[in-house]
């Protein structure tokens, strides 16, 4: 019966286009790396560099995707026994992407070939100039394209219109992994060893892919599904230590754990100090050193959380709750640029408006945008490009910098453009229900079947289910801060009792009346306590039942 539920969920989500067998039980099959445009140009240039003993530098980025992608290529060249240099920009000193001064420094350090990961696609001016000065550059990136592509050795980006690589939604680390597969194919060698390398480094690919919030469908799903197996082996010392400082020494690690436990800690390095700390942790081979680095990232993460809350409180007092602006565009000297993106995310969750929170460094305002569904934020920034020094990113999340002198004009323009666009869209979060279930099927067996749909994440969320007309038996506010609501239901017809938890919604307690019937929207979750496994309803929303 429960397997019917899984089939029904897949049918409702994807229709007949989905190969159900492949989705549930698919092997580790990836597309031919040479389908990616410029792949042979890239691999031949790298082979030439190795043959001629040229100096190679990997140019990365400071977020989790960028750091894992950098680590992946360093692992690759380590496997090839060819030493390379690494440059991960400093978020505060250099900012995102390729700076002329950084590349000149790299050139002066003797580098002949730069390979970028997770960045470069919009830095055509800098790249063209450096190419002209004799520095060869290979760009690997997955961000949206600008008006003009860099003119360099090779540009790997599945979003290029003529690129035939079928998976368009790869993360930066996903593109780096395609390059790795292409290069290993080009260079040849012991097939067993190559296969071994490609499998045991999938943990890096899974972590970067989940952290970058790309859809977990298609090839990303395969990469993450198999990458999580490697994460669960805890073979990479750095990730094992990071899990144990977070209290996850044992137990299964899911995509959700990667998103909420591993990723924020790796990210905290680049937000508060330098992302090299996260990079070093991923490659560290010594137990003690890795433990030290993991503890350091963990305390960075705590500090990052405190800072986010402090800034959020300040933002709340700056906004008129009764007359919300179409977009929240705010900046302050005391807000670190590494944290403003997290603040923007929380603002969007609370107000359902796009948020452009920014820090001020000298005479430059640097901010991070988070958008609402249906509003392409890169397009909106494009409408204010005259005021901007720099911008780029994805539909839902982007970064920008504006000279302080243009800040007022920028604010006005953004509010005007967003107000105009918002007339055409409904920014409220929509929840689509995957399936309505009967109380009788809500059990461990259903939970197990549903988990065949994992890994869960962007575009493949845990199924949302509806249980209609269940009677409220008991309610209780729980938790150390008394902020969660426990609601116990019983189905009158079958007498079956169910435990529900509405996290962080204790304030709704008074709205509920015992013995009344409610319709419940929930995700089915499992709770393990002293060896006992129980399922409970993780409540998304509840309404009084109208079904009689
Ligand atoms: Mn990325």
Image (tube, rainbow, N blue to C red):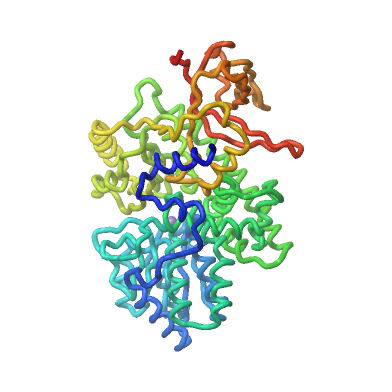
- Residue 62 visible in the picture: no
Residue 203 image point, x, y percent:
57, 60
Q: Using residue 199 as the reference point, say whether residue 287 is left or right of it.
A: right
- Residue 99 visible in the picture: yes
| Front residue (pair 537, 279) | 537
Q: Is residue 214 above or below residue 100?
A: above
Identity of the residue drawn at 26% across and 65% down: 162
Residue 114 image point, x, y percent:
42, 73
Q: Residue furthest front?
A: 1
| Front residue (pair 506, 269) | 506
| Front residue (pair 460, 112) | 460
For ligand 1, the image quadrant comes to bottom left
Residue 191 image point, x, y percent:
54, 79
Asked where in the image residue 375 lies, by quadrant, the reply is top left
| Front residue (pair 350, 514) | 514
Identity of the residue drawn at 67% across and 34% down: 534
Q: Is residue 334 above or below residue 287?
A: above
Identity of the residue drawn at 67% across and 57% down: 240
């Amino acid at each position: 019966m429960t397997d019917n539920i899984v089939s029904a969920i897949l049918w409702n989500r994807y229709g007949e286009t989905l190969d159900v067998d492949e989705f549930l039980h698919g092997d580790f099959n990836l597309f031919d790396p040479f389908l990616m445009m410029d792949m042979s140009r890239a691999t031949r240039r790298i082979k030439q560099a190795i043959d001629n003993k040229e100096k190679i530098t990997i140019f990365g980025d400071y977020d989790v995707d960028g750091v894992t992608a950098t680590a992946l290529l360093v692992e690759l060249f380590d496997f090839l026994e060819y030493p390379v240099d690494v440059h991960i920009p400093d978020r505060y000193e250099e900012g995102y992407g390729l700076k002329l001064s950084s590349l000149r420094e790299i050139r002066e350090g003797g580098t002949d070939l730069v390979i970028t990961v997770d960045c470069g696609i919009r830095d055509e001016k800098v790249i063209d100039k450096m190419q002209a000065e004799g520095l060869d550059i290979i760009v690997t990136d997955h961000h949206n394209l600008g008006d003009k592509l860099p003119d360099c050795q090779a540009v790997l980006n599945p979003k290029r219109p003529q690129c035939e690589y079928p998976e368009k939604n790869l993360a930066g680390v996903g593109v780096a992994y395609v390059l790795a597969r292409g290069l290993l194919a080009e260079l040849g060698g012991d097939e067993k060893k190559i296969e071994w390398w490609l499998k045991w480094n999938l943990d890096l690919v899974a972590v970067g892919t989940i952290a970058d919030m790309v859809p977990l469908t298609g090839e990303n799903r395969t990469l993450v599904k198999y990458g999580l197996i490697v994460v669960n082996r805890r073979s990479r010392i750095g990730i094992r230590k990071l899990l144990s400082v977070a209290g996850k020494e044992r137990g299964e690690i899911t995509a959700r754990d990667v998103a909420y436990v591993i990723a924020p800690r790796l990210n905290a390095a680049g937000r508060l100090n330098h992302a090299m700390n996260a990079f070093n942790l991923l490659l560290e081979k010594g137990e003690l050193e890795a433990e030290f680095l993991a503890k350091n990232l963990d305390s960075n993460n705590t500090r990052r959380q405190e800072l986010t809350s402090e800034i959020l409180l300040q933002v709340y007092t700056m906004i008129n709750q009764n007359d919300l602006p179409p977009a929240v565009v705010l900046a302050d000297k005391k807000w670190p640029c590494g944290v403003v993106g997290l603040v923007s995310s929380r603002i969007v969750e609370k107000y359902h408006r796009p948020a452009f929170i920014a820090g001020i460094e000298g005479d430059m305002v640097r901010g991070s945008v988070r958008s609402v569904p249906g509003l392409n934020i890169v397009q909106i920034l494009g409408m204010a490009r005259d005021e901007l020094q720099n911008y780029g990113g994805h539909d839902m999340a982007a970064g920008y910098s504006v000279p302080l002198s243009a800040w007022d004009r920028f604010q006005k323009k953004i509010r005007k453009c967003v107000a105009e666009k918002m007339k055409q869209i409904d920014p409220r979060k929509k929840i689509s229900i995957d399936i309505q279930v009967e109380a009788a099927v809500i059990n461990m067996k259903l939970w197990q079947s549903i988990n065949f749909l994992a890994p869960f994440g962007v575009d493949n969320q845990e199924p949302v289910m509806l249980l209609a007309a269940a009677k409220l038996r008991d309610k209780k506010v729980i938790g150390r801060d008394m902020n969660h609501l426990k609601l116990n239901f019983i189905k009158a017809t079958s007498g079956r009792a169910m435990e529900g938890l509405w996290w962080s919604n204790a304030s709704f307690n008074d709205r509920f009346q015992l013995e009344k019937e409610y319709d419940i929207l929930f995700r089915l979750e499992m709770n393990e306590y002293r060896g006992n496994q129980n399922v409970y309803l993780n409540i998304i929303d509840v309404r009084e039942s109208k079904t009689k």
